[in-house]
Image (cartoon, helix red, strand yellow):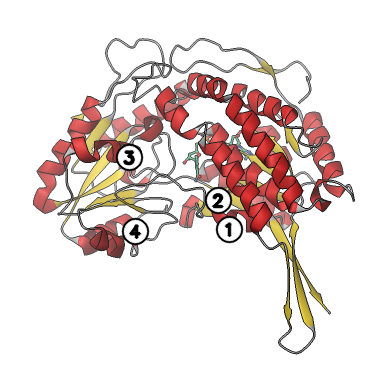
């Protein structure tokens, strides 16, 4: 990073609305410099891309250690900036990113980067898995460290170099990551970062010296990026929005003392600002009132407060704009005749910070706006279903296909249902992405996969040698 031309970004504490500092805003010239550094590091014939993968893995392990040393700083900065409760940040913004890095260091050591087999028509065939090149990595603010690491780790394992553009809402944690990169002695030019907004992001996506784009963010921005990458024939991975279903079967145990934590993680995690949440809850008509009561009790019982308080379960929305968006959807839900069972307003006694009460609508029609569009806040839509077939049909009646869950006392029955849902990931009675397995969406939720061995392939291209 280098200081720039005067414009600056002011991150704000989402719980208090107080400025947290000021950082210089990167310009197109900064992006040019970052891409040039990444390009030079990648093209160096004896540099990073040419190293044995196991040598790159050593650097990755050092980086994971340097990140872990800064755990408290990451937790504090992330939750101040985006309102993520510190308890959630401790679970997913530290520990998890370094685990992803160590997982890919392991893959770098074990995966076959060159394989020779006998050719079908004689001779031998060598398949080389080469790094795709300079990667433009663009990330949102909701899980800034985890989502950045979903890109850094496989790209490093493959031998790529990166230019990362964090979201302007979460710039301070990115500085800690830059510090860790320096301490770990990642070779110069391998990881570069530019703090800037969407215009600079667009400039980076179409930069002539970039070889691949990896984007996580909204479906609207993803479509714009895909158009540019399509024109340039540039490989792109897109992790976009979601409106997943939490399918409650008629045999589900609704005792919140047993499944409350799991349901919370699957439907309301990080103040509802998590892409894979099952915010459409499909409830069996035979036990409909019980399911409505359970979700109403769950949402109504959560501790709402300053994200820095370890007891907080629901913090504020990340920005004033995000709260406005959520409140607009709540108004649409009311206007469309859905039945509000809890929440719907701002919590009492929290006059500063962009708080919204966890909100449950019952009797929602799946074709209504609040059931079809991503709200990205703590708002659940409960939709009745008559049987498993109807639940599957409603789950699949969505433009999105990112996550989802099935809640049942019978795991075998649950497995049979999840296999019928058109979505990139889905869980039986749980839902947190596992670093060792592919993560991503179908339909408007994106293209390609991150995590797992598939995540490494996304940063490689093959060269086949006939000998
Ligand atoms: P956003 O699309 O507005 O911004 C995301 C990032 O892209 C930011 O860094 C932004 O500056 C940049 N950007 C925006 N438009 C761009 C463009 N045209 N070209 C290049 N860069 C551009 O999204 P957001 O509001 O920051 O994040 C919330 C969205 O992200 C939600 O829709 C959520 O579902 C999605 N998300 C998806 C996943 C996933 O893995 N599928 C994970 C987290 C968040």
Q: Which residue is mark 2?
A: 451
Q: Earlier in the sequence, mark 4 or mark 2?
A: 4
Q: CA distance from mark 4 to mark 1?
A: 24 Å
Q: Disc 4 on helix, strand or loop?
A: helix
Q: Which residue is nearer to you in this view: 342 or 228?
A: 342
Residue 77 percent location from the top left of the image: 54, 20
Q: Which residue is nearer to you in this view: 219 or 236?
A: 236
Q: Which residue is mark 3?
A: 267
Please identify, in this view, whether the residue under mark 3 or under mark 1 is nearer the observer.
1
Q: Earlier in the sequence, mark 3 or mark 2?
A: 3
Please identify, in this view, whether the residue under mark 4 or under mark 1 is nearer the observer.
1
Quarter containing the C terminus: bottom right
Residue 284 percent location from the top left of the image: 16, 52
Q: Residue furthest right?
A: 45
Please identify, in this view, whether the residue under mark 3 or under mark 2 is nearer the observer.
2
Q: Disc 2 on helix, strand or loop?
A: loop
Q: Which residue is mark 1?
A: 454
Q: Which residue is nearer to you in this view: 316 or 465?
A: 465
Task: Characterize the local packing of mark 2: few (<14), some (14-19) or many (20 or more) Cα atoms within 10 angstroms.
Answer: many
Residue 450, relative to residue 113: is it above or below? above
- Residue sitting at x 40%, y 22%: 316
For residue 191, what is the image quadrant? Answer: top right
Q: CA distance from mark 3 to mark 2?
A: 22 Å
Q: Which residue is mark 4?
A: 396
Q: CA distance from mark 4 to mark 2?
A: 24 Å
The answer to whether mark 1 and mark 2 are in CB contact below 8 A is: yes
The answer to whether mark 3 and mark 4 are in CB contact below 8 A is: no
Q: Disc 1 on helix, strand or loop?
A: helix
Q: Which residue is nearer to you in this view: 294 or 200?
A: 294
- Residue sitting at x 77%, y 34%: 31
Q: Earlier in the sequence, mark 3 or mark 4?
A: 3
């Amino acid at each position: 990073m280098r200081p720039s031309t005067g414009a600056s970004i002011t991150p704000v504490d989402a719980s208090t609305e107080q400025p947290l500092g000021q950082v210089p805003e990167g310009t197109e010239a900064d992006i040019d410099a970052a891409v040039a550094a990444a390009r030079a590091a990648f093209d160096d014939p004896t540099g990073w891309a040419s190293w044995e993968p196991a040598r790159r893995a050593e650097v990755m392990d050092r980086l994971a250690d340097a990140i872990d040393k800064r755990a408290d700083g990451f937790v504090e900065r992330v939750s101040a900036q985006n309102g993520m409760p510190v308890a959630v940040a401790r679970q997913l913004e530290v520990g998890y990113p370094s685990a992803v890095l160590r997982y890919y260091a392991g893959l770098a050591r074990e995966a076959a980067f060159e394989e020779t087999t006998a050719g079908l028509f004689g001779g031998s065939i060598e398949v080389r898995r080469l790094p795709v090149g300079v990667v433009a990595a663009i990330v949102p603010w909701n899980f800034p460290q985890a989502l950045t690491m979903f890109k850094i780790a496989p790209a490093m394992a493959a031998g790529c170099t990166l230019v990362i553009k964090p979201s302007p809402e979460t710039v301070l944690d990115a500085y800690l990551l830059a510090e860790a990169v320096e301490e770990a002695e990642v070779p110069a030019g391998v990881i570069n970062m530019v703090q800037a907004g969407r215009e600079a992001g667009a400039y980076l996506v179409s930069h002539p010296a970039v070889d691949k784009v990896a984007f996580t963010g909204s479906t609207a921005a993803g479509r714009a990026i895909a158009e540019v990458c399509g024109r340039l024939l540039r490989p792109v991975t897109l992790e976009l929005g979601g409106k997943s279903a939490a399918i409650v079967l008629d045999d589900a145990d609704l005792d919140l003392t047993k499944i409350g934590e799991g349901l919370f993680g699957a439907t309301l995690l990080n103040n509802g600002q998590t892409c894979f949440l099952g915010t459409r809850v499909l409830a069996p008509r035979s036990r409909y009132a019980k399911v409505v009561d359970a979700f109403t009790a769950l949402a109504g019982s959560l501790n709402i407060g300053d994200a820095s308080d370890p007891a907080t379960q629901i913090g504020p929305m990340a920005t004033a704009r995000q709260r406005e968006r959520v409140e607009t959807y709540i108004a649409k839900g009311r206007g469309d005749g859905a039945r509000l069972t809890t929440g719907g307003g701002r919590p009492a006694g929290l006059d500063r910070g962009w708080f919204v009460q966890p909100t449950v609508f019952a009797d929602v029609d799946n074709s209504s706006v609040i059931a079809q569009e991503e709200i990205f806040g703590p708002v659940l839509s409960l939709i009745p279903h008559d049987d498993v077939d109807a639940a599957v049909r409603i789950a699949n009646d969505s433009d999105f296909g990112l996550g989802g869950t099935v809640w049942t006392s019978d795991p075998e029955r649950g497995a049979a249902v999840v296999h019928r849902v058109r979505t990139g990931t889905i869980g039986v009675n749980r839902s947190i992405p596992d670093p060792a397995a592919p993560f991503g969406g179908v339909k408007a939720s994106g293209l390609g996969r991150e995590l797992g061995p598939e995540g490494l392939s996304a940063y490689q291209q093959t060269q086949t040698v006939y000998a």
